[in-house]
Image: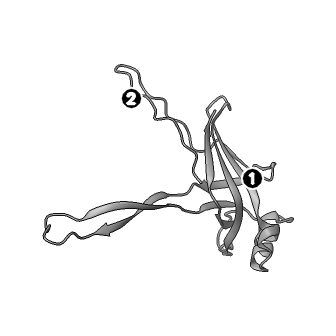
Amino acid sequence: MLSALPIPLPPIPGLTMETHSLHRFTVAIDVVPFSAFTECRLPTIQIETDDIKEGGLNTRIHRLPARVNAGTVVLKHGVAHIDFMMAWYMLAMNHKIKLAQRTMIITMYDSLFIPLNRWTFINAFPIKWTGPTLASGTSAVAVEELEVVHEGFVVTPI
């Protein structure tokens, strides 16, 4: 389920488009904000096609739209003493998917911390946990990664 957005107007000549920094975002899971994420990779959305090869037509293949494949969300954050992410993953790993399903909201902000866009993922649950790389010769923060699937999402420009 992807929400239908209105088609944006074309750029107005002479008006520059504002771009925004990547580091101003929040993640809320079931309305509980988790601001300690160091990285959030939103999904790749791809329209799958069925290729039809028409007999006698050797110059091209008909590509008909089939399904929309909305990929996974990847969240990274520093390992903490109380690890909500691992507990969430353990629910899914123990086949308690209904208990693991959450509403996940990712909000992006501008330089004045005014919300720009909001992505609401429905029935999201983790499918992959990657632990930190432990190395005695470095002072880097231990970062874990969680890959999350969902049943669709809605994009809300704010």
Left or right: 135 as drawn, with respect to 85: left
Q: CA distance from mark 2 to mark 1?
A: 36 Å
> Crowdedness of circle 2 by 10 Å Cα count: few (<14), some, many (20+)?
few
Residue at image mark 2: 10
**N-terminal label among 2 and 1:** 2
Q: Report the front residue among 92 and 67.
A: 67
The amino acid pointed to by label 2 is: Pro
Which residue is rendered at x = 31% and y = 68% of the image? 51
Tell me where residue 4 appears, x and y as whole percent.
Answer: 54, 43
Q: Quadrant of residue 91?
A: bottom right
Which of the pair 64/117 is nearer the observer?
64
Asked whether residue 22 appears in the rendered view, the answer is yes
Which residue lies at the image location 67% right of the left edge and 66% below the top edge? 146
> Which mark is drawn over residue 53?
none
The image quarter in which residue 150 lies:
bottom right
When the figure is inspected, residue 99 is found, relative to residue 42, above or below; the finding is below
Q: Secondary structure at mark 1?
A: loop
Q: Circle 1 sits on which residue?
A: 36
Q: Amino acid at mark 1?
A: Ala
